[in-house]
Amino acid sequence: MQACDVSSGSWDQFLEYMKENSSATAFENWFAPIVLIEESAENIKLEVPNIFVQEYILSNYKEELCSFLPVLPSGELAIEFTINERHQTTNSPTVVTGTPAIATRDSEYSMKLNPFYQFQNFIGGPSNEFARSAALGVATNPGRSYNPLFIHGGVGLGKTHLLHAIGHHIVHEHKKLRIQCITTEAFINDIVDSLRSKSVDKMKRFYRSLDILLVDDIQFLQNRLNFEEEFCNTFESLINQNKQIVIACDKPPVQLKLSERLVARMEWGLVAHIGIPELETRVAILQHKAEQKGLKLSSKVAFYIAEHIYSNVRQLEGAVNKLSAHCRLLKEDITEELVERALSQMLQSVPHQEKISVEQILKSVAAVFQVRVSDLRGSSRAKDVALPRQVAMYLAKEMINESLVILAVSFGKTHSTILHACKSIEAKVENDEMLKRRIEMARRNVAND
Ligand code: ADP
Ligand code: MG
């Protein structure tokens, strides 16, 4: 499936919309000077020439901004503004949010928690219920339930979300506890910085005095030998003091290329897997995300999207963002037809539940071309049999994920016969509308078999 990060480009879409819908002067004054610094599905960083531009666009174009750019659950825009240094003496960022985007506990080793990633925004379902409950258990009783908790699963399935949710819960409910939530990359950077500024002891003291350490994407520790050792020491020091550790990773501990000692330690506590959410969970996630965007999504449309986008929650979110921009631009209701148009790149075709067999293809082709399956299997060169036989080979190559050699065996032919058949049909359908339709019919019959 085509990777499609719909979040990238929301700022461009917004600019495009404003260009069409505001005067040239207004556009040049207010929007053209803004520089996009960073953009993700959750927030966006913009550099403005001065505070007036920031205030002006916020008071006059809030509705348009909300339609295109990320918003917080509170409905506030998740835009971080920076004033361009060349124009101002200060460039301290102002976060335009109801709640702070960054929860900071320690001035030197700051902790960034995404305000969206909280337990109440995490939709549970059979695929993630175990990991969610374990995360909640750890957040409620840190150091006393599962230690370490190791959460693993594919990309975009909610690992970081759960890690941050634990962070938020602890910041609010256990105010006295010292917590750090960090990516493996940032941990490595802290080590490098401390080496450079000769403050290694201070860094070690900081990490080893934590009550809770949340580490994201531990797979990035692979092949970083020196850092692995430091991480391992920190890990053991904390575990020995019954301090809570939670780790997120894209694979289970055993598949990590890390020292046996560290892998064994990671398996000590609880290993929880997050899988791909089931259809009903995907629908619930879609409806939750749409609600947050103020988008009305009928359950028919939600099911339609969820049936077609099934491997990654981030893409479901992307779909909601994209739809919201489309509705805004075209002022249309969300129908299946609009969804199909707006999301054509993202929609995956529904996977075939079962592998298609050569037999199925032969049956379907025989029915459409009014011949017998045994004729297709035979070697008669009569045109009314030879053509459908070639069609069957052509469809088999297209619909069955096997090598030519294996397909050839199923047809009792050589692989060059199959290749020749495919080329011949490809050439014929160019000018033969009738043949094209019959092939399409046979293809559909196989798919619906
Ligand atoms: P990972 O770290 O596993 O790659 P993330 O935690 O970054 O994935 O999740 C990707 C996006 O999908 C995030 O915006 C997150 O909020 C959302 N998401 C994932 N799972 C869920 C869920 N069960 N309910 C709501 N949102 C989810
Ligand atoms: Mg992640």
Image (spheres, rainbow, N blue to C red):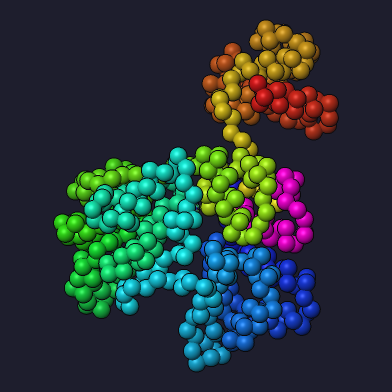
Residue at 56% x, 90% y is 87
**432 to the left or right of 394:** right
Q: Quadrant of residue 390?
A: top right
Answer whether residue 374 is magenta in the image: no
**449 to the left or right of 130:** right
**280 to the left or right of 362:** left
Name the one closer to the observer, 18 or 392: 18
Q: The C terminus appears in which quarter of the rendering?
A: top right
Residue at 66% x, 57% y is 295
Residue 423 seen anywhere in this rendered image of the structure: yes
Answer whether residue 331 is magenta in the image: yes
Residue at 58% x, 73% y is 36
Q: The N terminus appears in which quarter of the rendering?
A: top right
Residue 185 seen anywhere in this rendered image of the structure: no
| Residue 427 place in picture, x, y as percent | 76, 30
| Residue 224 place in picture, x, y as percent | 28, 58
Residue extent of the magenta highlight: 319-340
